[in-house]
Amino acid sequence: MKHLDICEIFYSLQGESSYMGMPCVFVRLAGCNLRCSYCDTTYSHSRGRMMSFEEIISEVSQYPAKLVELTGGEPLWQEESPALMQALLERGYTVLLETNGSLYLDEVPRDVIKIVDIKCPGSSEGDSFQFANLKLLAPHDEIKFVLTNYPDYCFAREIIQRYQLAGRGLHFSPVTQLLPAGLLAEWLLADGLPVKLGMQLHKMLNLR
Ligand code: SF4
């Protein structure tokens, strides 16, 4: 029987990405291979509780939404997580995967919608992205940059240009304590970048 180390399972509105605002069941996996400076889920770095796939799916199915997101921590840090994604797809769920981009995406089922971080230098994990992952992205996948300052913005802008990412789902999210969203909006407007400003809706609404 397959098991995963689970930090928590909860129900909320999706707060980032093109799915922002939609009711979603979150499966937060325990453990992460990175240590970002602004991490707001450090509690997920320690061990959670081992749950079988049947237990996880049973808990997910107690909520009415058919949208489920695997998040962390880093979901791909546990090698059984792609099999859970497949099991959820087979039960009719739309499956989102929030991943930090540092681990290879080749095992992720193609129908999963991947929301992939490219870590900027201000995260202190700026060299972590696996650029080979860009070739594994499907048209429905999305890329997110979390920004702490203007050098991060310049880094993200340069990556978009160098790897010709315009036309993909691109999101720039400010770390609220470090970078005012209005200032980031001014930079985006000045450059006319083809990205969406991400505002972490769940935090604005004081949801989980
Ligand atoms: S990848 Fe995510 S969970 Fe891991 S340290 Fe960075 S922000 Fe925290």
Image (spheres, rainbow, N blue to C red):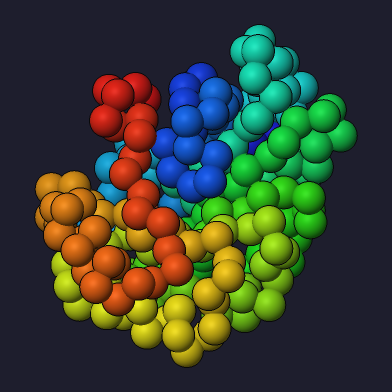
Which residue extends farthest right? 90
Would residue 161 appear left or right of 186 to someone viewing this image?
Answer: right
Q: Is residue 185 above or below residue 164?
A: above
Would residue 148 appear left or right of 97 to someone viewing this image?
Answer: left
Q: Is residue 54 above or below residue 72?
A: above
Image quarter hosting the N terminus: top right
Q: Is residue 113 above or below residue 162?
A: above
Q: Position of residue 161 (x, y in %)?
A: 45, 85
Number of disc labels: 0
Residue that appears at 77% across and 22% down: 54
Would residue 115 appear left or right of 68 to someone viewing this image?
Answer: left
Does residue 119 appear in this view?
yes
Of 93 and 32, nearer the camera is: 93
Residue that appears at 36% across and 49% down: 198
Residue that appears at 54% across and 76% down: 165
Residue that appears at 58% across and 70% down: 167
Image quarter hosting the C terminus: top left
Which residue extends farthest bottom? 162
Q: Position of residue 2 (x, y in %)?
A: 77, 36
Quarter occupied by residue 156: bottom left
Of 30 and 140, nearer the camera is: 140
Of 77 and 182, nearer the camera is: 182
Q: Position of residue 196 (x, y in %)?
A: 41, 56
Of 193 and 21, nearer the camera is: 193
Does residue 8 appear in this view?
no
Would residue 159 appear left or right of 186 to someone viewing this image?
Answer: right
Q: Position of residue 72 (x, y in %)?
A: 47, 43
